[in-house]
Amino acid sequence: MRKALAVGRKELRQIVRDRRTLFILLFIPAFFLLLFGYALNFDIRHIRLAVEDHDRTIASRRLISAFTNSGYFDFVAAPRSGREIERLMNLNEIRAALVIPDGLGRNLRTGQVTPVQVLINGDNANTATTVMAYALTIIRSVSAELTASITQRPVVPMVTVVPRVWYNPELRSALFLVPGLIAYIAMITAVVSTALSVVREKERGTMEQVRMSPIGPLPYVVGKSLPYFIISLVSAFLVIGASMALFGLPMRGSWLTLLLAISLFLVGALGLGLLVSTLADSQQVAFQVALLISFLPTLMLSGFIFPISSMPSAVQVITRVVSARYFLTALRAIVLKGSSIDVFWRDLMALAIFAVAVLALASVRLRREWR
């Protein structure tokens, strides 16, 4: 027992002296408890809704009010045509659209059944299923109220729902999960592989030789990243090819645009791994930190599993520095929607800014070590 206590005291002193380990043990668990406790939310709220109202009567306004007062939908646009709805859906400005036909109020008074159309963005199958259930419940409830108020007696509701899911009509979960898995696999592979590269030089003692060589930090960083970039790019396209063959993933957009999006994402991931590599002193620490900053944010804060719109505002701000968030939006727009680059150019710009920022930070950090 004495020996065990002696080893315990020695290990405790070592942990207290190692501030990084102490920080990880004390702060990181509490941080992730708070962060993911608020971020992990299966409730779908604040669904961005567009309403194309061709009736403009008391009945149609009551139907719209039922959606906006439900607490699930936020009225954000009033398009006048199906083409405008398609544009808003492609830009991810809306997740659903309610199309009210002309004659709703008149048909209710005469006892005719009137179909109301609900268009849903199906690139996220889980969200689309929940949105459809919300819409069906609201319309059926309002229909019963309107019918009873006009006929003065409870009868069969005269407003029916015609739901239509875009981009994923069958609501196949694979078409929602596979793009997220592509981002997830590419991020972890790229970050972990480069996180170990510079640390390996430190542990082998060859870093001093590199410092004495006539090469600057930026060329060194680029040279370190280039082989991993090629390998990660080939790996990403192999994953996409396997997804198309095994899971029926469509390819409705441009392959060149897809290449651009994946390249920007991988450059940022490789730069992030190099930044970790310049901060860590051992491969074990580099591996742990690389997993920490790539695995959890990509899985939890990118919109892969949990809708960002349902997260608290503070957590939504944190998601803006997660590159996988922008990559997922661009990837789904290219693969599932076949959108042109002018629809998601902001996401590509965000990926480019992230890549330049992390590569610059890695170069600056490496320059300080070389002095």
Image: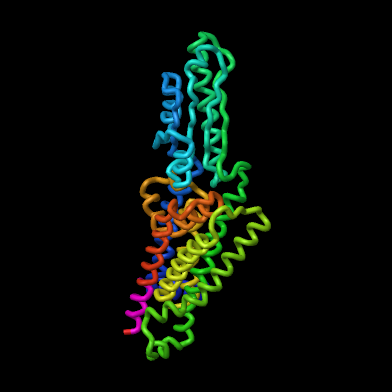
Residue 259 in picture, x, y percent from top left: 52, 64
Q: Quadrant of the C terminus?
A: bottom left
Q: How many marks?
A: 0
Q: Residue at x 44, y 36 (%)?
A: 49
Residue 110 in picture, x, y percent from top left: 53, 12
Q: Nearer the viewer, residue 4 or 74?
A: 74
Residue range in magenta is 361-370
Q: Residue at x 53, y 73 (%)?
A: 230
Residue 216 in picture, x, y percent from top left: 36, 83
Residue 302 in picture, x, y percent from top left: 47, 54
Position of residue 107 relative to residue 251, above or below, is above
Asked whether residue 255 appears in the rendered view, the answer is: yes
Say which quarter of the image contains residue 368: bottom left
Left or right of 317, for residue 304: right
What is the chief secondary structure element of the magenta stretch? helix
Q: Nearer the viewer, residue 165 or 253?
A: 253
Q: Residue at x 49, y 17 (%)?
A: 146
Left or right of 114, for residue 293: left
Q: Nearer the viewer, residue 237 or 141?
A: 237
